[in-house]
Amino acid sequence: MENIELLKIINLFFKEKNNILSNSKIERKKLIPNLNLIESCVGSYNEVYNTKLLAEMLKINFIIDDGIEINFAKDFSNYIIKDQLKHNDINTSNDINIDTEIMTKKGRRIDLLIHNSDFEIIVENKINANELENQLEDYYNDRLNYINKDKLFIIFLTKDAHKPFSLDENLRSELEKYSRICYLSHNSIADFIERNILNRYDSLKKDKYISIYSALIQMRDNEKNISSNKLEVNNMEKNIIDTFFKENNIYESLNNIYDIEECSNLFLDAAYLIKSRKIQLSPIKNQIGIISKTIEYLKNKDLQNKDCIYLDEAIFKGNIINNRDANSLPINININNNIYIKLFINMNCCYVAVFSNIDEIIVKLNTPEIKEEIKKIFGNYKLEEGKNNTEEKDDDCYVYYFLIGENDNYEEIGNIIINLYNYLKEQHF
């Protein structure tokens, strides 16, 4: 297919853009509304609340009217250990403990631990947060102090059941070889609630249990929503585009695999260029240049070693363009593996943060003398306080930060980062 023919297809599509979008809005109104109380109250994508909600569900244990025991912890343990990982030799019949935020000896917190003397299941819940270095390995090694490795299992829970990139390759191979690690999507949790609870315990539909039953339905739908990313809406929009292509004989113009590949690549390029317009219209368009100059300034001032990770402008711009709500991290400076200086940027704001995930460090950073020194280093920038309550801590625990404006000076920002690095290094956290 000639390039000019491909461009005609693109041109036709965008000439009809308003009609396509109008039809999409009309069809969207025909979909059943999704009133998600969990999303409204605590946010569907908050890992901490999502984990606590899962933990509370697993703690439910009582006898219903027909004498049957409801024990969701046992149901879930059987689902993981016996159904998913095929370890039928593990005893799951005894009482099971459900704990969240279990501290390791290195100061990290296990999201959820399902355990008794017969087995332990580590659950690491990732929705939007990034993996931390050696995170799962640390959890695993820590729990080996409490139970034999043959009875220790890991669940890595994500939107799409992908494998962790931060887990040591040798350990991951061993865990996979002996079926002791399970990669689950949040949709898998929804399926568990549907098949192993709602469809199994009919008595839960009685009026006296209706609050539990309705809560489980909300949880099921919320878990589906996390994984599906509004799949029903996406399918509806695809159907509208499919109809448009058929009505305008677009498919007939694609005569071979080469034509299809060329045309799809052209649409991908067009989509990226359209998404790139977000940068030009966003409040942080000027900050992108400031960040790039700040990185060059830090490198020229010799703040460049194995502990300093800097992204090229094309990479962090690409992160913003391709991910609607995600932060990009152009600057990430590691201080003794205990504390970090990070520069975050997203579609709405840009800030430099002092960051830690270790309770003792967070407490120390919040002492008046250290807070006052950091305030002095920030200079003209207002010291904003992030999370200083360790009980509310999650994987993104920034303690202090300041916002970068569109007209700020990159040298001043660079000097603050250098002075902050030197000061925190001297404190021997």
Image (cartoon, rainbow, N blue to C red):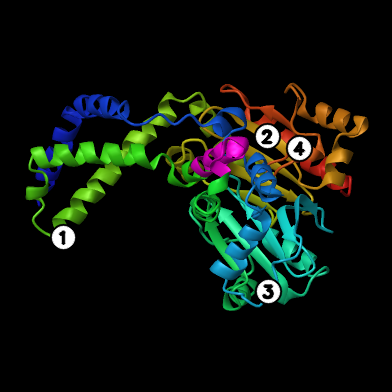
Question: Badge 4: few (under 14), some or many (20 or more) residues near its Cα, within 10 Å?
Answer: few
Q: In the rendered structure, which disc, 2 or 4, sits on the residue that comes first in sequence?
A: 2
* Cα–Cα gap, marks 4 and 1: 53 Å
Name the residue rendered at 82%, 68% in the picture. Answer: 146
Q: Nearer the viewer, residue 343 or 338?
A: 338
Q: In the rendered structure, which disc, 1 or 3, sits on the residue that comes first in sequence?
A: 3
What residue sits right under mark 2 in the picture?
Answer: 352
Q: Is residue 314 left or right of residue 109?
A: left
Is residue 65 visible to us here? yes
Name the residue rendered at 55%, 68% in the picture. Answer: 83
Q: Amino acid at mark 1?
A: Ile
Q: Amino acid at mark 4?
A: Glu
Q: Quadrant of residue 6?
A: top left
Q: In the rendered structure, which disc, 3 or 4, sits on the residue that comes first in sequence?
A: 3
What residue sits right under mark 1 in the picture?
Answer: 257
Q: Is residue 78 above or below residue 67?
A: below
Residue 213: say if magenta: yes
Frontmost of labels 4 and 1 is: 4
Helix, strand or loop status at disc 2: strand
Tell me the magenta residue range.
Answer: 204-222
Helix, strand or loop status at disc 4: helix
Q: Which mark is residue 90?
A: 3
State the image coordinates of residue 38 (x, y, percent, origin top left). 58, 33
Q: Quadrant of residue 170?
A: bottom right
* Cα–Cα gap, marks 3 and 2: 48 Å
Q: Nearer the viewer, residue 348 or 315?
A: 348
Q: Which mark is residue 321?
A: none
Q: Amino acid at mark 2?
A: Val
State the image coordinates of residue 160 (x, y, percent, origin top left). 48, 53
* Cα–Cα gap, marks 1 and 3: 51 Å
What residue sits right under mark 4 in the picture?
Answer: 392
